[in-house]
Amino acid sequence: MRIGITCYPTYGGSGALATELALALGRRGHEVHMICYASPFRLRNFAENVFFHEVDLSGTYPLLEYFPYSLALAVKQHEVALRERLDLLHVHYAVPHATAAFLAREMLHPQHDLPIITTLHGTDITLVGQAKSFFTITKFSIERSDGVTAVSAYLRDETYRAFECTTCEIEVIPNFVTLEEYHLADGEGCRSALGPPNVKVLMHISNFRPVKRVTDVVRAFARVRAEMPSVLVFVGDGPDRPAAEEAVADLGLSRDVRFLGKVDAVADLLRCADLFLLPSASESFGLAALEALACGVPVVGTDTGGLPEVVTDGAGTLVPVGDIDGLAAASLDLLGNPNRHRDARAAGLRVAERFSADRIVPLYEDLYRRVLGL
């Protein structure tokens, strides 16, 4: 199949999933064309059967105070669909990608049929899509898609509740992890660079948006650090990084906290951690948590959104949102109990196997065939 994929190329679960899907589809012999305003952060090198098409953002006009990205995206989707004879367009994140795809399809009619599949990832439904300015167009774009998927049962149910989508059927196809990349450590790796052998390594990876509650990570770590030698490693960047850095300074933790910034290949870092912290206010799925579990790292997070669908079978501990004492207690329990930690590692590997790319990617292929009538 010839598949077009549009996503946000910046750091975040939707862009990561869309790019990993493109790479997996390419390995399985499909021709994949990624249509974005920049090269996705996980599209690092040449990948067989995967091609990148950049949306032209250079146009300016005095009357247009804000650049009409949705229109420029629709034009590029139309252009690529015609030139590459795409079989379908798979867009990730409803706003504005599904809307632009609808426009591209209308422009193609009747020369070329272009079915649209929309994958919902989280804040496009729980935050952006429900804003008054976008509610109607989000609902319209979902209902005009030929296939709709959500990355968790939680997100599917929230979409039905919020938008009362009566003319669309939402299929749950969860996020996945590529086990050839995310796996147990083969040796020491980067461990010695993060801390001495007797020091526990706690890690958080995110886009540092307010929903990630990164200062909760710092405060919970402060209580862990008071009980046992440990270091905290932050990976990523975003608007709340200064607040996290300020909290680290205020609590006198600067010697034990490292901010690594944006890192494309996080698997090597995850393999060096003893515990992954994810105290988000909301998670539609929790891809970072799944990637940690695949690397044998137990997760301590919050009992919200789709995380309970991921952190299962004793692979970690979930506490209420904002419960910093609970985060610290659960972390100390796992880190201070070798048997408990070993069992959580083993449980996490079993969870990762259930969400492996080899199991999930064929679900997308099956959906594509059904939409195309194959």
Image (tube, rainbow, N blue to C red):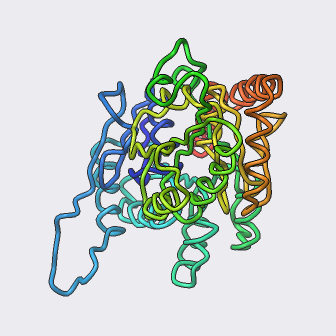
Q: Specify whether 91 is left or right of 86.
A: right
Q: Work out whether 30 lies above or below 320.
A: above
Q: Position of residue 371 (x, y in %)?
A: 60, 46
- Give the residue drawn at x 83%, y 34%: 314
State which quadrant residue 351 falls in. top right
Picture layout, residue 66 above or below residue 245 = below
Give how far across and how far down residue 42 sits, in percent: 40, 38
Q: Residue at x 33, y 61 (%)?
A: 73
Which residue reaches farthest top?
187
Q: Is residue 371 above or below residue 209?
A: above
As drawn, 188 above or below 221: above
For the residue pair 105 and 312, the one nearer the viewer reads as 312
Q: On the picture, is 90 further left or further right than 69?
A: right
Q: Residue at x 58, y 60 (%)?
A: 215
| Residue 95, x across and y down, in percent | 49, 66
Say which quarter of the image contains residue 324. Answer: bottom right
